[in-house]
Amino acid sequence: MRTFRHVHTSAGLALVLALAVAGCGREEAGGSAPLPDPVGSWAVESLTTGGRTLHAPDSARLEFGQNQAKGNYGCNGFTAVVAFAGPSAVTVTPGASTTMACADMEFETAFAKLFQGKLTIDRGPDRLTLKTADGSTIAMTSAPAASDAPLTTTRWSVESLVSGTTSASLPAEAAGKAQFTIAPDLAVSGNLGCNRFSAKATVEGSTVTFGPLTSTRMACEGPVGEVERALTDLFGSGPLTSGIEGRTLTLTAADGKGLTAKAAPAAQ
């Protein structure tokens, strides 16, 4: 004869609930991490295109907004208009970019070519991969928020001269030589590409005004002389609007002329 045990209804319900909770805990513990939202800052790791992998320079990055993107190809900056189709696809319309001559132009050119048109998005924990229709990829990882270099105590190395929307890199003869530092007391010292100079600055909010420049008097001809004259005119043109993003400084005059400079280690 088969014997049936009677289980009290409330006790049975409690048992079922306890097992369900335990099961959910195991599922949650073993579940995968949430996938990242494409909107945010990303550090570019590499490109794959034409059967080759191109490794990115440290400065290559991409920042997605809801409707716009901006970033750096590794040397030149760029903007774009973006339209997301959910989290798995985006259409990119290139915007403006700087046009400096850079050391790794192969990577720059490939990045610019891939980051346009309709791209599919593969997401993984702390990773994002953009894929073109032909299977080329842009691989990225989450980029930590970079703190801005301070205006003072930083040695700024001038990389390009700006006129409106046009940016031109410094000629090789002046590259790395045109630089300046603003001390905590706002005393400015540096090199115009040929002659050393000093001045006193005034800082009000995002505006920097350089006082009269005192410089050495070497004769500077050719491209170096042209850079020196351009920087002398810029520093003497009155209030300059300053902007710092990460390790990049821009100084812009009212007529649209200006410079971009990169931060080097703090001056001793």
Image: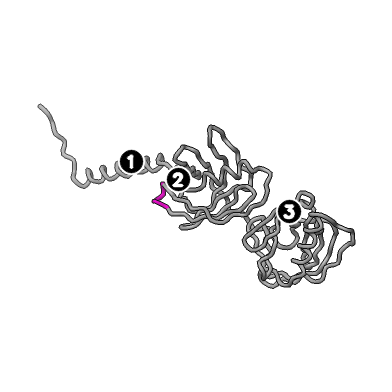
Magenta region:
84-88
Where residue 208 appears, x then y in whole percent? 71, 69
Q: Which residue is mark 3?
A: 170
N-terminal of the two: label 1 or label 3? Answer: 1
Tag 2–tag 1 contact (CB < 8 Å): no
Q: Which residue is mark 2?
A: 119
Asked if the magenta segment contains residue 91, the reply would be no
The mark lying in front, picked from 1 and 3, is: 3
The quadrant holding residue 149 is bottom right
| Residue 268 appears in the figure | no
Main SS category, magenta section: helix
Q: CA distance from mark 2 to mark 1?
A: 39 Å
N-terminal of the two: label 2 or label 1? Answer: 1
Q: Residue at x 49, y 44 (%)?
A: 128
Q: Which residue is mark 1?
A: 23
The quadrant holding residue 180 is bottom right
Residue 145, relative to residue 211: is it above or below?
above
Element under label 1?
helix
Q: CA distance from mark 1 to mark 3?
A: 65 Å
Where residue 63 appears, x then y in whole percent? 54, 53
Q: Residue at x 86, y 64 (%)?
A: 215
- Disc 3 residue type? Leu
Element under label 3?
loop
Q: Is residue 170 left or right of residue 131?
A: right
Residue 170, relative to residue 124: is it above or below?
below
Q: Is residue 78 left or right of residue 103?
A: left
Q: CA distance from mark 2 to mark 3?
A: 35 Å
